[in-house]
């Protein structure tokens, strides 16, 4: 992979360890529906920044705890177990185009969050979902601030300008 192709990778999950003795691997999918990860035939594995290695998804299925997959070239329990903790990436080119008001979480990481009055709240470190809504974890001078990522709070997202404008609700 070229350097520009590395920058085009999106983090979509993590390998958790072996399942059985034939090389199957347990997977934690970070896609909206866990099974969506099985739609990508080519996976790039490795830590953020590389080195990366390409794998082909041979088969996959869902179970109550996540996904179970078989990757090309991984044919025994020891090989599968050795991959535990490895990050899964897919090229952005494999992902569907989104409507203008939708964003991949990866595109929001590092964006500055400001209030509608211009007060800087910090940069988005990661996002996570709760039962009620998605939440931005924002780093402000080493402290974590949690802000809901809802229509009521988020007024504007400008990925090109690396900016998210929010309206803080009472008590926030």
Image (cartoon, rainbow, N blue to C red):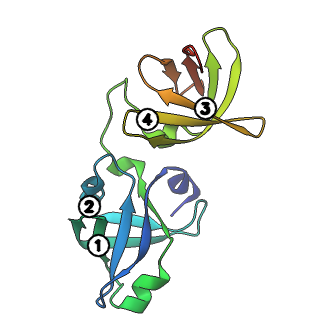
| Secondary structure state at the residue bearing disc 3 | loop
Q: Residues within 10 Å of mark 3 (few under 14, many from 20)?
A: many
| Secondary structure state at the residue bearing disc 4 | strand
Earlier-in-chain disc, 4 versus 1: 1
Disc 3 target residue? 111
Q: CA distance from mark 1 to mark 2?
A: 8 Å
Are circles 1 and 2 on residues that touch, CB within 8 Å? yes
Residue 13: x and y in percent read 42, 59
Q: Residues within 10 Å of mark 1 (few under 14, many from 20)?
A: many
Q: CA distance from mark 3 to mark 1?
A: 33 Å
Disc 2 target residue? 38
| Secondary structure state at the residue bearing disc 1 | strand
Residue positioned 30% across, 65% down in the render = 65
Earlier-in-chain disc, 3 versus 4: 3
Disc 1 target residue? 69
Earlier-in-chain disc, 3 versus 1: 1
Are circles 3 and 4 on residues that touch, CB within 8 Å? no
Earlier-in-chain disc, 2 versus 4: 2
Disc on res. 134: 4
Q: CA distance from mark 3 to mark 2?
A: 29 Å
62 to the left or right of 18 = left
Are circles 4 and 1 on residues that touch, CB within 8 Å? no
Residue 143: x and y in percent read 73, 38
Asked if 5 appears above or below 125 in the picture, the reply is below
Earlier-in-chain disc, 3 versus 2: 2
């Amino acid at each position: 992979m070229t350097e520009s192709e590395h920058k085009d990778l999106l983090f979509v999950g993590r390998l958790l360890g072996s399942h059985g003795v034939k090389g199957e691997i347990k997977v934690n999918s970070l896609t909206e529906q866990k099974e969506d990860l099985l739609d990508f035939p080519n996976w790039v594995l490795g830590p953020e920044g590389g080195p990366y290695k390409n794998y082909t998804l041979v088969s996959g299925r869902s179970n109550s705890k996540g996904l179970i997959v078989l990757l090309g070239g991984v044919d025994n329990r020891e090989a599968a177990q050795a991959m535990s903790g490895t990050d899964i990436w897919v090229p952005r080119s494999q992902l569907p185009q989104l409507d203008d008001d939708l964003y991949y979480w990866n595109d929001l990481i590092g964006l500055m969050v400001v209030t509608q009055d211009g007060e800087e709240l910090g940069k988005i470190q990661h996002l996570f979902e709760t039962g009620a809504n998605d939440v931005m974890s924002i780093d402000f001078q080493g402290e974590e601030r949690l802000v809901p990522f809802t229509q009521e709070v988020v007024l504007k997202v400008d990925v090109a300008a690396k900016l998210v404008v929010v309206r803080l609700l009472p008590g926030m």
